[in-house]
Image (cartoon, rainbow, N blue to C red):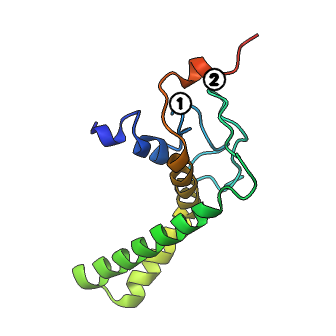
Amino acid sequence: MPYILQKGSKTHSIFHLKCPRCQEGEMFETGSWSFVKPFEMLERCPKCDLNFYPEPGYYYGAMFISYIWTGWFCLLFVAIFTWGLGWSINAAFGVLILFMMANFVYIFRISRLMWLNVNVKYDPNAVEKFGKSES
């Protein structure tokens, strides 16, 4: 596995939806493509106790990341399908809409992880330092 996807990198935390500090704890209650509680985040990391809600309105910046990321993806998607594969513009937009409907929860989650990873640094000893005691 390339380093960019290995534990310790920001991309590992983002694409595996793991806590950015320990990269072991889950951030969301359900799976990536679950439509049951799709936007419910845990309050704290179950492994290292990182507060996922450091202040009110913290994830406002994630909205901008999502907007930019989705906008560029949609432009490239339609360009590839129309110019690269020769599809009609209507067919390309139809496939794009279906793709985005199936992946909007994952995009929402990735945007939140990107925003949180801007401010939180990976600590390989986070579970031992900050984790909840078993007593």
Q: In the rendered view, would you say 52 is above or below 111? A: above
Which labelled disc corresponds to residue 22? 1
Q: Is residue 72 left or right of residue 66?
A: left
Name the one closer to the observer, 55 or 16.
55
Q: In the rendered view, would you say 88 is above or below 49? A: below
Q: Amino acid at mark 1?
A: Cys
How would you rate the neighbour count of disc 2 (Cα within 10 Å): few for under 14, some for 14-19, many for 20 or more? some
What residue is pinned by disc 2?
A: 130
Earlier residue among tags 2 and 1: 1
Which residue is at a point 38% across and 82% down the rendered structure image? 92
Question: What is the spatial separation of the Cα atoms under label 2 and label 1, in whole angstroms?
Answer: 10 Å
Circles 2 and 1 in contact, beta carbons < 8 Å: yes
Name the one closer to the observer, 132 or 86.
132
**Residue 59 % position (x, y):** 65, 57
Task: Identify the image quadrant of the N terminus.
Answer: top left
- The local secondary structure at tag 1 comes to loop
Which residue is at a point 42% across and 41% down the rendered structure image? 12
**Residue 96 % position (x, y):** 45, 76
Res 86 visible: no
**Residue 101 % position (x, y):** 55, 69
